[in-house]
Image: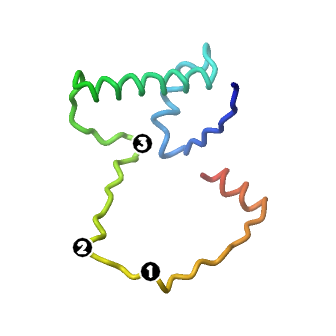
Amino acid sequence: MKTRRTVYMSPSKDADLDNYIKQFEKRLTFSHIIKELARDGIKYRKLQKSGRIVEEYVRPESGYDKVIQSNTSKNEQDFSNVKLEKKEVKKEELENRLDEF
């Protein structure tokens, strides 16, 4: 089964990926590079889970960090009065937002 997927890369947050990919683009396609990176990541995670790779967490240069989940049970908040409003976005505005993403 073939599936097309879109990858949005931010020029600032994903600069490390962009720099890495550029060195291979002359001889490999973008999709090939991304697939290999994903496969390498899967292999790496499996080795980490098996205990063969133990490292300290290092914050990536891209600026992404682990998401810390807060424990809200101590600080119960009442959201019963929150009202959601539906907002319609024009196709042109949506495309602009995705381009800037």
Q: Mark 2: few, some, or many residues within 10 Å (few <14, many ≥20)?
A: few
Query: Mark 1 or mark 2, which is nearer the start of the sequence?
Result: 2
Question: Quick one: 20 or 70, which is closer to the camera?
Answer: 70
Q: How many marks?
A: 3
Do the CB atoms of the residues marked 2 and 3 lie less than 8 Å apart?
no
Q: Earlier in the sequence, mark 2 or mark 3?
A: 3
Residue 59 falls left or right of residue 17: left
In the rendered structure, the answer to whether residue 3 lies left or right of residue 51 reads right
The answer to whether residue 70 is above or below residue 62 is below
For badge 3, the amino acid type reads Ser
Q: Which residue type does callout 1 highlight?
A: Phe
The outermost residue toward the top is: 27
Q: Give the residue drawn at x 65%, y 36%.
A: 5
Look at discs 2 and 3 and give the one toward the viewer.
2
Q: CA distance from mark 2 to mark 3?
A: 33 Å
Identify the residue at horizontal 73%, vertical 70% (top origin): 88
Question: Mark 1 or mark 3: which comes first in sequence?
Answer: 3
Residue occupied by mark 1? 79
- Please identify the residue farthest to the right as the structure is shown: 91
Residue closer to the observer: 69 or 17: 69
Spatial CA span between label 2 and label 1: 15 Å
How far apart marks 1 and 3 lie (CA) works out to 34 Å
Q: Amino acid at mark 2?
A: Lys
**Above or below, 46 relative to 7:** above
At 49% from the left edge and 86% from the top edge, which residue is drawn?
A: 81
Across and down, in percent, residue 87 comes to 69, 73
x, y percent for residue 55: 22, 31
Tag 2 residue: 74
- The kind of secondary structure element at disc 3 is loop
Q: Quadrant of residue 43?
A: top left
Q: Which residue is mark 3?
A: 62
